[in-house]
Amino acid sequence: MPNRPPKTTNPIQRVALLLLVAMNLLWPQSSAAQQQAYAKADPEGFQQLQTRIATLNVNGIPMTDYHLAKAQAWLEFSKEEYFDNDRSGIVESTFAEALGLIEQLEAGVMTPLSMSTPLLEGEARLDLTSWQVVEELKVQKLSCAGNLIARLEVQLVHVEHELHELGPIHAVPYRQAVQRMVEEIKAVDCQPPGQKNAVPLQENSSEAKP
């Protein structure tokens, strides 16, 4: 039986194969960690970020940490607006804020992370009084209530979002939540436990008591 001649490759197929090889060399298949970085603001993406927050916590960052608590708050904000079918872009913006903090914490960034809170929309803060209260609390209570302050800041961004989108009436319940959080933070006792019941020592008087 005569040998069959080898099959020739179609020129178009050959070019396609060469392009595929080149793409694999230039852009190799992403690892699981890389794929996580491409998370989107959808239920799967929310779960991915929640898992990464939990991992950071297990690896030693407490949930009382200002930045980890803030990432959690941004994530919850994004989820809420996603399921409210908000199409303003706030879902993606808040998701990006959460992702950015998570990535910096995962990378073990040595320089201090930003303590600022972006509005994400609008050019001016509409609730100036509340923002002033937040700044005062950051000075007074950041060391002992950093996680609560982080959540308060994100909640206040939520207030600003409602003010910009639907006005003061719709923002009422969100403002009420801000007030409750402010009172909770004010009630936190930042004094170390060993000093709570300490009685200040009186200086010895050189004068004889009568």
Image (cartoon, grey):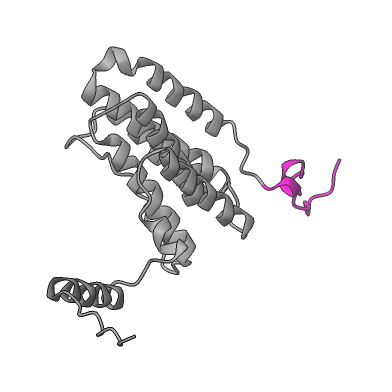
Tell me: residue 8, above or below residue 77.
below
Most foreground residue, 157 or 75:
75
Which quadrant would the C terminus be assigned to in this image?
Answer: top right
Can I make out residue 55 in this image?
yes
Write down the quadrant of residue 77 in the picture: top left
Most foreground residue, 98 or 34:
34
Write down the quadrant of residue 6 in the picture: bottom left
Tell me: residue 17, above or below residue 140.
below
> In the image, what residue occupies the spot 30% across and 74% down?
24
Most foreground residue, 12 or 116:
12
The secondary structure that most of the magenta stretch takes on is loop
Q: Residue 32's x, y, as percent?
A: 46, 62
| Range shown magenta | 192-210
Which quadrant would the N terminus be assigned to in this image?
Answer: bottom left
The number of discs equals: 0
> In the image, what residue occupies the spot 20% across and 77% down?
9
